[in-house]
Amino acid sequence: MFDATAESIIALNHIDMNFVKPSGAPLPVLAGIDVTVHNGEILGLLGRSGSGKSTLLRIASGLIKPSAGGVRYRGEPLMGPAEGIAVVFQTFALYPWLTVLENVELGLDAARLPAKDARRRAMSAIDLIGLDGFQSAYPRELSGGMRQRVGFARALVSDPILLLMDEPFSALDVLTAETLRTDFLDLWIGHQLPTKAVLMVTHNIEEAVLMCDRILVLGSNPGRIVAEVKVPLPQPRNRLDASFHSIVDEIYSILTSRMTEAMGSQSQLHGGLVQQLPEVAATRLGGFAEALAAAPFDGRADLAQIGPALALAANRLFPIAAALHLLEFAELDGSTIKLTAAGRVLAQSDTDGRKRLFREHLLRFVPLAAHILQVLSDRDGHVAPRGRFEYELEDHLPRREAEKTIRTAIDWARFAELFTYNDRTRTFSLDRAAA
Amino acid sequence: MEQHAEILAGGNWQQRAPGWRDLIATLLVLGVVILLGIGTRQMTAPFAIEHQPEISLSLTALPLYTLRTVMRMLAAMLASLLFTFTYATLAAKSRRAETVLIPILDVLQSVPILGYLSFTVAFFVGLFPGNVMGPELAAIFAIFTSQAWNMAFSFYQSLRTIPTDLDEASRSFRESAWQRFWRLEVPFAMPGLIWNMMMSMSGGWFFVVAAEAIAVGDLQIALPGVGSYVAKAIEQRDLGAVGWAILAMTVAIVLYDQLMFRPMVTWADKFRFEQTAAQVVPKSWMLDLFRRSSLAAAVGHPLSTVMRHGARARFSILPGKTMPGLLPRPVGDALWLGLVCAALGYVGWAIVQYAGSALSWNDARAAVRSGALTLARVAALVALASLIWVPIGVFVGLRPKLTAKVQPVSQFLAAFPANLLFPVAVFLIVHFRLAPGIWLCPLMILGTQWYILFNVIAGASAFPSDFREAAASFRVRPWHWWREVMLPGIFPYFVTGAITASGGAWNASIVAETVRWGSTKLTAGGLGAYIAQMTQAGDYPRIALGISVMSVLVIAMNRLLWRPLYAYAERRTRLD
């Protein structure tokens, strides 16, 4: 169990991170972040995609340098990847041309060990993580779960003091992820690892509550810490406990309130154009509204319940909830979502009715869609290049987010039959026949 | 941990009694070593331009000639690899070097290969006076120029596209630059590099034949080899000797493929980056033989241990630290830019001085006019070859059994030096008194049209069968089937093939637009004929002019036609 007075393993102080906008001006992605990971704890970084949590992890690993602020690893300034820090990657990052054993030995490349010792240590890491028998296999012969085990063995073979994990279970299926999580926790609780502290990035709320001693919730644009949640439950934890559930609910409410707040403030900025649209297909919104309107929810549901009921992970559920909220088909309040009157109509309409209603709301509540329509109506020929709008957005949003927002706008407008888009010429147009 | 003892001891190979595999493997290795030894000794023999050994047309001399030709090829390939590993790595690692090296590479690869020969042969001959090494190096250099550029490009591209996660893993595990190079960069680049080596090799046979009989002005050199053998045969109007040379070359190419490339491709299969199992696993009897021979394993084991240790060694000059810049970055950039501009300015001035004294505007007009003629020929030939080979390629590619038979043949034909066949064609043209202006043209694309065929076959056989089944079940009409289904499907492959074919046609124009049969000389006009003529006369300023015009035309064609087409093909056939 972790103790607040324990020594700091790594400390990130006043971290700012800026990317560069097309205009050359800095675009902040992380602002004023302070994180300290203490001896003996698993610290979780939880946030939506685009909150910069992976960037923060890379700063802690020394892979990238922050624009401002400093990192101290065991009291010394961190100047790049250091001995004693190991990373587990979301995509495993195994070398496909090396066998399992060789991949694990890679973790010792920097150590200048004699070949025999390196092999012995690699074998014991392979043993520890449950890979024995697979040492001569190539990664492509392994299932996802086994591949990530190689990722763990490679990270652990060098006896790291600090283990950094970047969404290590998110590329695995639910069952495999659960097994690997439990196996890792067993090693951690049983003090079978030399590792003193873990910093883990995740977007899965339950996973964070299950594994971490402390969770930092990140808000987006720019990424900053909006809440710290302590998890004082003893390991191993039970997902069905009431106390477990109340922490999960608490985090859901923090995230939704952040989301509604952010959407409110965004719509005031720059005439609302810079509203980041959640990446979710229009047809999905109708389907979700229908499910929400039906029993057992009858138009109102707890996010922590409807997610699992519809088999939606948090990272899929939040965009849908956000989109419905933004289009005023639903209202988010704390950790509950409630259909509005328009939302109920949407749920009951046929396809044509849905399209009509969707079009109305799209024009009223998504300034970007209204703006594109305006530009198209004003122009001769009713055609405008995509780059124009992307450029407008990129001045305020990171490139990836701008791209996503445009993609969503296109999808929604296509569904609403508001305007069309031709990907070959990368232009928007009013004329439906042109697409 | 006793269960891992065998791994700790280094693999689980056992000592067995030597078997037939060992015998064959030993014979193969010894044979290759001895042949290499013979070839090398001859390549360093004394040599005087004035008293060159006569090229013999006797059949018994041919095997040795073929060996020498093959040796040149091998030497050039090694040089190309060395060049690739250094030049491309430098370009990929240093931002400043990249701004200079990559444009240079782009120009270098559009210069006609035989152009290099005429300029460097005097230099190399002077480097080793009285030794055959000089002319040998000139020929090897010419082959090198036909192989190195695309290999370097491929390696550079691979280094620039290393997946972020592997790059981060390598950095977070603090691999030194040396470890990273052998563990990550070379393996990742390997499939692309080997493919480009094969393409280079195919092109190389053409130039090895052309580079052996060198005649620049008064400097006349005939290096013992298949190319000189054919040149001699042409001089003596001996069609039978040409036939024997074709046979010898065929054997050499098949052996090269079986003993070198097939094993390499099979071995490199493990470097494929895709995480899924391959559908078609390349096979090689040669590699199987060596993998299964316990003797080869025993001999190879210490070697592979040394190599593994070599790759694991750190060899970093500055352990763990990057050198802090001596100057602030903008200042360094400005200095670098200034340096590059000064160098460019000097070279430009030197060219103007040199060209101005030797050339007039009339020369430029003549060169551009013949350039236009050759351009028209290349365009027409690529179009014609496409019309013929695209339907055939699709027909073959959609039938897996036929593909398995035709594909190796088409690849062999692409590798076969078409200039060995020229005498046959010229004999026919002379015999039937055909118009050289028209009938010499097909020779330009004779060797490279096969690239269109085998790329189209590859495209058609990779075409997803569910698309075809969908088209069939909707009973798409034939015309629509071609336009909407098949042609878009094979388009990227076709473009790849057509780029290679047109590049090859430009290169071939130098030897195809002017040909001889004994004392009869046929000329079709055009830029290739212009360069060939000036080379024979030893008129360096005009050789340079012709080569520059050709380079400019090739670069223009790449930029204005092929690259946009390629980008379009890539964009259109993406599904996500």
Image (cartoon, rainbow, N blue to C red):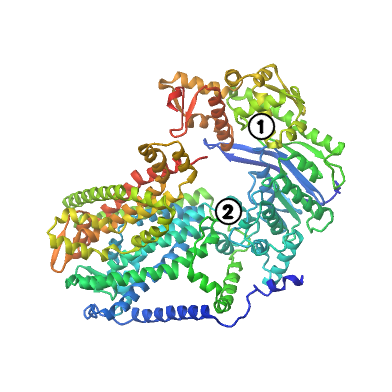
Q: Position of residue A195 (x, y in %)?
A: 78, 56
Of B75 and B396, the residue lying toward us: B396
- According to the picture, the residue beneath numbered tag 2 turns out to be B276
Mark 2 vs mark 1: same chain?
Answer: no
Query: Which label sits in the foreground, 2 or 1?
Result: 2
- Is residue A415 placed above or below B388 in the rendered structure? above
Q: Position of residue A161 (x, y in %)?
A: 76, 56
Q: Secondary structure at mark 2?
A: loop
**Which of the 4 image quadrants contains residue A139?**
bottom right
- Amino acid type at mark 2: Thr
Q: Secondary structure at mark 1?
A: helix
Residue in the image at 37% along x and 41% along y: B482
Question: Tag 2: Cα neighbours inside 10 Å, few (<14), some, or many (≥20)?
Answer: few
Q: CA distance from mark 2 to mark 1?
A: 31 Å
Give residue A27's mark: none
- Amino acid type at mark 1: Pro
Chain under callout 1: A
- Is residue B425 placed above or below A353 in the rendered structure? below
